[in-house]
Image (cartoon, grey):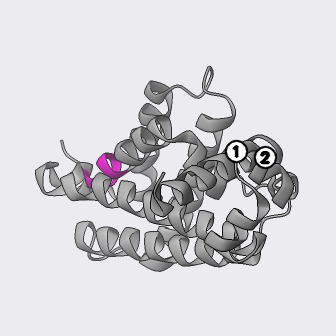
Amino acid sequence: MSAVDRREQILDVTHRIVDEEGFHAATPNRVAEAAGVTRPVLYQLFGDLAGVLVALVDRESERAGIQFAKATSQLTEAPEDDRLISTFCGVLNAVDEHPSTWRLFLFPPQGAPPRLHQRLAESEELVVQFLQRELERTVPDLPDPEYTARMVHAAGRELLQRRLADPTHATTERLIALVRHVRTWVLPTSALPN
C-alpha cells in the first residue's frame, strides 16, 4: 500500500473510532491495531497521535466544505425565492450521504482537539457570511441581515442535528416543509412568490 493510501486507511479507521466512541478512544495502540499497522508506521506517517487527529479534522473539514460548495453551486438554477431552501436541501442531502463527516461537526465528539473547534468556528462563520449575502441580495431592505443570517444558521444547524439524531422522525420531507414554512417568517411577504 502506498504511503498516501496508508494515510487514508489510518484516517478512515480513526474516523470510525471517533465517530463511534469519541476522540478519547482513538489511542495510538487502538488506531494502529485497527489499521493493521505498527505504532512506528503511525508515527512515521503522522508524527504523533495529535498529527493523526489534526489530519482527520482537516480532511473532514475539506470534505464538508466540498459538499457545501456543491450544495450552493446549483443555486444559479434555483428560482430566486428558493435559493436558501435549495441550499438547505443540498446540505441535508450531504448529511444523508456522509453522516459521519457531518456528525463530527454537528456533534463534536468527546475529547475533540482544539483544531476541530477552530475549524468549526471558521466554517460556521463562512456559512453565516454566505447566508447574509443571500439575504441581502434577496431582501435588500431586511433589517439586520447579519443577525438574521445567524438565526437562520442556528435553526438550520438544529434541523440537521435532528436529522442525524432521529432520522425516523426528522424526515427530509418534514424538515424541508418546515424550512419552507419558516421562510415566510424570515422574509417579508413582498419577497415571497404569489
Please report the residue visible at 42 percent of the width from the left and 32 percent of the height from the top. Answer: 177
**Does residue 175 appear in this view?**
yes
Contact, mark 1 vs mark 2 (Cβ under 8 Å): yes
Where are the magenta residues, as a range? 83-87
| Mark linked to residue 36 | 1
Question: Is 177 or 168 nearer to us in this picture?
Answer: 168
Q: Measured along the vertical axis of the image, is residue 24 above or below residue 13?
A: below
- Magenta segment's dominant SS is helix
Q: CA distance from mark 1 to mark 2?
A: 5 Å
Residue 143 location (% of width, % of height): 42, 77
**Numbered marks: total:** 2
Q: Residue furthest left?
A: 77
Circle on res. 170: none
- The local secondary structure at tag 2 comes to helix
Q: Which residue is mark 2?
A: 33
Q: Is residue 182 left or right of residue 188?
A: right
Quarter of the image with the C terminus in it: top left
Tell me the crowding category of disc 2: few under 14, some 14 to 19, or many 20 or more residues within 10 angstroms, Cα based: few
Residue 144 visible in the picture: no
Q: Of 194 and 95, which appears nearest the observer?
A: 95
To which quarter of the image does residue 109 belong? Answer: bottom right
Give the residue drawn at x 19%, y 52%: 74
Above or below residue 178? Residue 66 is below
Q: Position of residue 11 (x, y in %)?
A: 61, 55
Task: Name the residue located 26 percent from the left edge and 76 percent from the top edge.
Answer: 140
Name the element at disc 1: loop
Residue 110 image position (x, y, % from top left): 85, 57
Residue 20 is a magenta residue: no
- Amino acid at pointer 1: Gly
Q: Where in the figure is residue 138, as x and y percent of width and height?
A: 24, 66
Residue type beneath disc 2:
Glu
Instruction: Give the residue displayed 45% in from the left and 75% down from the top.
Output: 126
